[in-house]
């Protein structure tokens, strides 16, 4: 990302990207800010304001060219910087993330999964192999991976995180409900489903 | 929520809540703002500033009483307003969410799951039964449920959302990668994993 783009705008840009991708699939030659706004239940003016933050948006006669718009969003958000990652924990959540088809498009390459359950080892999920956790150190160094997506249960979460850090992992995207302790040089990104729910519940339902 | 609390503070409050719960489990009688700050790699002053937004925080001699603090966070965030919800889509993600033990504590009761796969119907996940999707209309009205957590694949997502809306669902927490179209009176909360990743990746890795 060349410019500093606020979090909420990044979030909307990924939604615009999804909608524009649909338009391209349907071979549409044009997309307007009101079509995007309508889909997200926001104002047209918000969409145009967000687009002012993009590097350059190719305009068509009555809107934007979907292909150009998609490319501009991708360049702005830096999807072309490919990053390799491991999923640690091949339970339901780990498998769901391994099958999540959007990660590839957004520059996140999941190379493998890790678990301790002998029944899961050597299984393939979406062309990604599940290895025993003891292989992680060697594979991380061999494949140059320093991002781990942590999807183990709460109870072993801290021990597994400690092991990942010892194995050279520098970035942990934490999907466990545990608030991890980590040295300052390790970047932990806590995926906070409960905060997300509370935003949803408090804003919309009360 | 009595007061309007900013999103980032809500997010931190849920983390404080997790850490405080651990302290209570370990029978600790005291917790300090620097213990909380250290765990989240933030400044003590931020923790104290956040606590100023809470209704009332019981202070101990050198910090806070974990039990009081936990209760205050719960009251402030409104965990006691119980809400019933269905999970629609019993794939890996749906099952992971059905097993997510934190929802209960935060006032979200998942009552049942729905799917179309005959092999899954009548299975129990974490004491929640999987029903055929055709039962949803009756069960939603019988159990007074108007929140659906949507975890189906991208391809059928819009059709399933339309069906949910016809069945009386008013709030959709959307975990699919599809940006749903919905009438304005339906509240859709898009869980945006890609935006989350981009925040993580752009801020921390570039």
Image (cartoon, coloured by chain):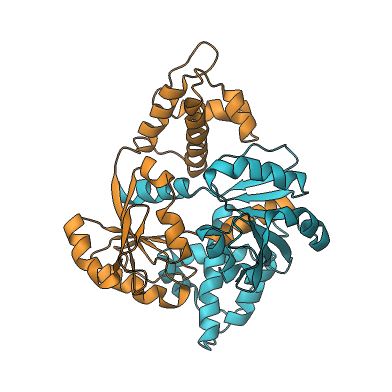
Chain colours: A cyan, B orange
**Could you say which is closer to the camera, residue A40 or residue B148?**
B148
Apparent side of residue A91 relative to residue A85 in the rendered image (left or right): left
For image coordinates 18% across by 65% down, the residue present is B138
For image coordinates 47% across by 23% down, the residue present is B66
Note whether B195 is above or below A74 in the view shown.
Answer: above
For image coordinates 55% across by 83% down, the residue present is A24
**Could you say which is closer to the camera, residue A154 or residue B43?**
A154
Apparent side of residue B94 relative to residue B41 in the rendered image (left or right): left
User: Residue B151, image x and y in percent?
Assistant: 42, 65
Question: From where the camera sits, is residue A65 visible?
Answer: no
**Could you say which is closer to the camera, residue B77 or residue B125?**
B125
User: Which residue, as the protein is rendered here, is positioned at the far front?
Assistant: A118
For image coordinates 51% across by 79% down, the residue present is A22
Question: From where the camera sits, is residue A11 visible?
Answer: yes
Q: How many marks?
A: 0
User: Which residue, as the protein is rendered here, is positioned at the far right?
Assistant: A142
User: Residue A20, image x and y in percent?
Assistant: 54, 76
Where, by quadrant of the figure, is residue B5 drawn? Answer: top left
User: Residue A100, image x and y in percent?
Assistant: 56, 68
Note whether B188 is above or below B28 in the view shown.
Answer: below
**Could you say which is closer to the camera, residue A2 or residue A33?**
A2
Where, by quadrant of the figure, is residue A14 drawn? Answer: bottom right
Q: Looking at the figure, which quarter contains the C terminus of chain B?
A: bottom right
Q: Looking at the figure, which quarter contains the N terminus of chain B?
A: top left
User: Residue A13, image x and y in percent?
Assistant: 57, 65
User: Which residue, as the protein is rendered here, is positioned at the far top?
Assistant: B61
């Amino acid at each position: 990302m060349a410019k500093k783009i606020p979090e909420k705008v990044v979030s909307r840009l990924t939604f615009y990207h999804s909608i524009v991708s649909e338009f391209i699939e349907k071979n549409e030659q044009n997309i307007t800010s009101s079509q995007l706004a309508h889909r997200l239940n926001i104002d047209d003016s918000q969409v145009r304001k967000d687009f002012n933050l993009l590097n350059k948006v190719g305009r068509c006669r009555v809107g934007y060219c979907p292909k150009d718009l998609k490319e501009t969003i991708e360049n702005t958000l830096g999807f072309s910087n490919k990053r390799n990652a491991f999923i640690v924990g091949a339970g339901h959540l780990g498998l769901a993330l391994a099958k999540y088809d959007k990660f590839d498009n957004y520059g996140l390459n999941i190379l493998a999964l890790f678990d301790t359950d002998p029944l899961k080892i050597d299984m393939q999920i979406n062309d990604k192999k599940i290895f025993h956790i003891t292989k992680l150190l060697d594979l991380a160094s061999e494949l140059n991976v320093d991002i781990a997506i942590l999807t183990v249960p709460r109870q072993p979460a801290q021990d597994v995180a400690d092991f990942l850090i010892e194995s050279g992992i520098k970035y942990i995207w934490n999907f466990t409900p545990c608030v991890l302790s980590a040295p300052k040089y390790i970047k932990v990104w806590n995926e906070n489903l409960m905060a997300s729910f509370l935003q949803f519940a408090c804003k919309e339902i009360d």
